[in-house]
Amino acid sequence: MPQTQAKAPVGLPPWRRTFARLFAIAVVGGFFFWVVQRSSTRLDASTEPAGLARGLLHGALMPLALPNLVIGRDPTIYASNNTGRFYKLGYTAGVNGCGLVFFGFFFWRLNRIRKRLRGTAHPGETSPREPVAGLRIEN
């Protein structure tokens, strides 16, 4: 009885995959660059004190302002004319929320890569570690 095996789908060559990832990073980076610059100029035009909502926005955009600062632009990342405690609470929540999204995505991807390298097929399934060649493990 002949056995049939499903063929693995043929993906993109490694150089095209790398190029596609770099292109996607550049597009997303350009989008964030534009958002930070646009929101900074728009929020600077307001004369009323910044409150909780602007604190959240400034806090979320603060880590994303680095590329603008590197090339010499000066986006507003903290409003000196603010309402006090509520602005600072919003700013802190925005910075932490942005960090949670960025680092959460980063560690999620890192975990997927680790699982792929270990060869675990199903999430949650623990597989015994194989000994490294040349190492003796005694109990």
Image: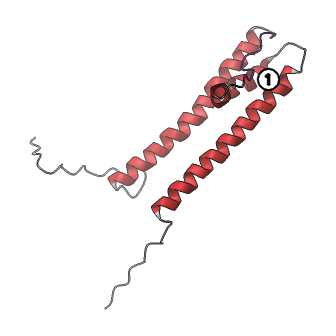
Residue marked by disc 1: 53
Question: Does the magenta segment cover residue 98?
Answer: no
Tag 1: Cα neighbours inside 10 Å, few (<14), some, or many (≥20)? some
User: From what the image shows, is residue 84 above or below residue 70?
Assistant: above
Q: Report whether residue 125 is seen.
A: no
Q: Main secondary structure of the magenta part?
A: loop
Residue 132 falls left or right of residue 120: left
Residue 114 falls left or right of residue 109: left
Place of residue 13 in the rendered image (x, y in percent of width and height, measured from the top left)? 47, 65
Towards the viewer: 128 or 46: 46
Residue 123 falls left or right of residue 136: right
Q: Look at 43% across and 77% down and name the residue there.
A: 7
Place of residue 40 in the rendered image (x, y in percent of width and height, measured from the top left)? 79, 26
Towards the viewer: 76 or 69: 69
Q: Which residues are magenta?
A: 74-82
Q: Look at 79% across and 23% down and name the residue there.
A: 53
Q: How is the image coloured?
A: secondary structure
The quarter of the picture where the C terminus appears is top left
Under mark 1, the amino acid is: Ala
Q: Look at 18% across and 49% down and name the residue there.
A: 131
Question: Does the magenta segment cover residue 75?
Answer: yes
